[in-house]
Image (cartoon, rainbow, N blue to C red):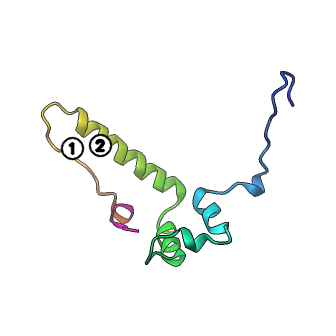
Amino acid sequence: MDERGKIRKRYRYADMMTPYEKLKSLSNAESFLKPGVSFDRLDEIARRCSDNEAARRLNQAKAQLFNSSTNLDNAPPESTPIAPLAQAHV
């Protein structure tokens, strides 16, 4: 507890995982995947770019979506393709 009586949780760095890593760590993880999807395929997709690159692409896509929805003349926004991630259908 801290000085105000609140419980302060501490997370060890060794225990931190991404949601995907946590899913893979479950004993029955395969049962949560859609039919036809495997961890081998998901691992291949995950290795295509770093976490930071994936976040950058996601933010770019969000910005493009926002810009297109607020554009008064409804012209499609100029964009750069988000290639590997946008094409991956899992």
Instruction: Classify 23 as above or below 52.
Output: below
Q: Which residues are magenta?
A: 85-90
Q: Is residue 66 left or right of residue 58?
A: left
Seen at 85% across and 28% down, the residue is: 2
Q: Quadrant of residue 35?
A: bottom left
Amino acid type at image mark 2: Leu
Q: Residue 39 in the image: x percent, y percent?
A: 54, 74
- Please name whichever residue, 49 or 35, is drawn nearer the observer in this view of the structure: 35
Q: Amino acid at mark 1?
A: Pro
Asked if residue 64 lies left or right of residue 45, the reply is: left
Name the N-terminal-most of marks 1 and 2: 2
**Residue sitting nearer the eye, 85 or 80:** 85
* Left or right of residue 25: residue 30: left
* Placement of 14 over or under 84, stated as above or below: above
Residue marked by disc 1: 77
Determine whether 9 is above or below 29 in the image: above
Residue bearing mark 2: 65
| Residue at 61% from the left image edge and 64% from the top image edge | 23
- Residue 86 position within the rendered picture, expressed as x and y whole percent measured from the top left: 34, 61
- Residue 12 lies in the magenta stretch: no
Give how far across and how far down residue 56 sits, in percent: 45, 49
